[in-house]
Image (cartoon, rainbow, N blue to C red):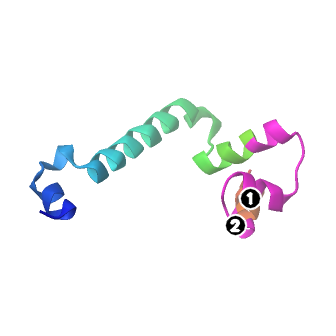
Amino acid sequence: MHAAALSALRPLGQRPGFMIRRLHRIHVALFQEKCAEFEITPLQYRLLSAVAVRKTADQTTLAADVSLDRTTTTGALKRL
């Protein structure tokens, strides 16, 4: 039987994609709970973490560090 067909036979709570998505939602909820007082997004946190490691960097370098395009990175930095 094909892997997709076997996956479809599993209950939803045992499917890898479902579990990964659930883990992501739990992670986001925990992040929001812990960082609510700082009013910061996960993306902004990633950027601040990258700057903390590098001490200084241009937007292109930061974009590469956090695996984003430069335009998205520039917008996030402006919102910080």
- Tag 1: residue type? Ala
Q: Name the residue located 44 percent from the left edge and 38 percent from the top edge.
A: 27
Residue occupied by mark 1: 63
Q: Name the residue located 59 percent from the left edge and 46 percent from the top edge.
A: 42
- Tag 2: residue type? Asp
Magenta segment: 50-72
Label 2 residue SS: loop
Using residue 1 as the reference point, say whether residue 80 is left or right of it: right
| Picture quadrant of residue 74 | bottom right
Q: Are marks 2 and 1 in contact (CB under 8 Å)?
A: yes
Q: Closer to the camera, 26 or 8?
A: 8
Label 1 residue SS: helix
Using residue 11 as the reference point, say whether residue 35 is left or right of it: right
The question of residue 63 being in magenta is answered with yes
Q: Name the residue located 88 percent from the left edge and 56 percent from the top edge.
A: 58
On screen, residue 59 above or below 23: below
